Image: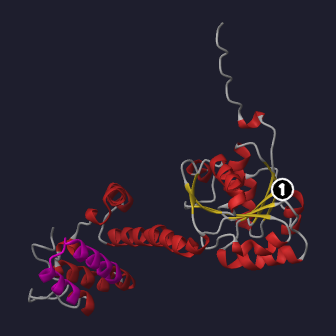
Amino acid sequence: MNATAPKEPLDARDRPARLTVGVVGAGRVGPALAAALQLAGHRPVAVSGVSDASVRRAATLLPDVPLVPPAEVLARAELVLLTVPDDALPGLVEGLAETGAVRPGQLIVHTSGRYGTKVLDPALRAGALPLALHPAMTFTGTSVDVQRLAGCSFGVTAPEQLRLAAEALVIEMGGEPEWIAEESRPLYHAALALGANHLVTLVAQSMELLRTAGVAAPDRMLGPLLGAALDNALRSGDAALTGPVARGDAGTVAAHIGELRAHAPQTVAGYVAMARATADRALALGMLKPELAEDLLGVLADGGRAAPGDGGTAGSTGPEESR
């Protein structure tokens, strides 16, 4: 007897919707997550947003989904995404619970990296099911965000009895769940902010400086370099360190600081702080020789006013600086 051929998987549009989904806060994150859930067969039914940008995002990513007040979102949805700024989340949850908007059995999901599920305690007391699902991704507020969720890690915190539900929602959005303990959420979030948010600032500053130096296409110049640096860092950690700080080139670092002070003084503090952190790590790893570290740290402590031993100013250029 011939084996029965496996059925083709159903397209998401052919599956019956399983949960009605509402979004409170149409920033960059909420509409993208709701759109991803829609692809998995769920049905967005309501979204709230105040600013013109929020209204446009909702219309683009969730067309035909009505824009209503937050309480009305909760009245219509079985799964509610609270996608507001971290500092606004506690007050929002308390307000919704106090007004009776939260219903027993309703899934209340926030996307804050800072908080676990304790911030949802007012909703829990009203009978809701609390989940913390934070996508470790930067969002643009456009349809590309839905595509970027494929393979994206989510920092997940949930009561034990809801772990399977949390995992299923993340997987349906295309993500990978990473379990974060309640007490570790602030540290987890700080780590992501340190890596992603500060990276944007560093890249933007670097592009501005390259333009000042006469580079016509700083993005084209930086793209391969930063891509390789990121790949090396993810693969090798501190062993991927290169550059004048890791080598202990105090004269070069002093020259850098002198040029930054002349052309972009607002970048000096950040350069010095990152150079100090880099020197500490390179020294601990044994890459930076102690005898070279002394001069280097002296330059950084002095703010790079003069390169030790070079007899010149911080802006002077020698063989080391030209590498």
Indicate the quadrant where residue 272 lies. bottom left
Which residue, given by chain and number where applicable, does mark 1 sit on?
Answer: 78
Image spot of residue 251 (x, y percent)? 16, 81
What residue lies at 77% left-to-right and 33% top-to-bottom? Answer: 14
Can residue 303 be seen here? The reply is no
Q: Residue at x 54, y 49 (%)?
A: 151
Question: Does the magenta stretch mainly form a helix, a strand or a loop?
Answer: helix
26 vs 170, nearest the viewer:
170
The segment highlighted magenta reads 272-298
At 65% across and 21% down in the image, what residue appears?
A: 6
Quadrant assignment for the N terminus? top right
Q: Secondary structure at mark 1?
A: loop
Residue 185 in sight in this render: yes
Residue placed at 85% from the left, 66% from the top?
127
Residue 129 is inside the magenta segment: no
Q: Residues within 10 Å of mark 1 (few under 14, many from 20)?
A: many
Quick one: quadrant of the C terminus? bottom left
Residue 144 placement (x, y as % from top left): 59, 51
Q: Identify residue type, mark 1.
A: Glu
View extreme (front): residue: 160
Q: Was residue 295 drawn as part of the magenta stretch in this picture?
A: yes
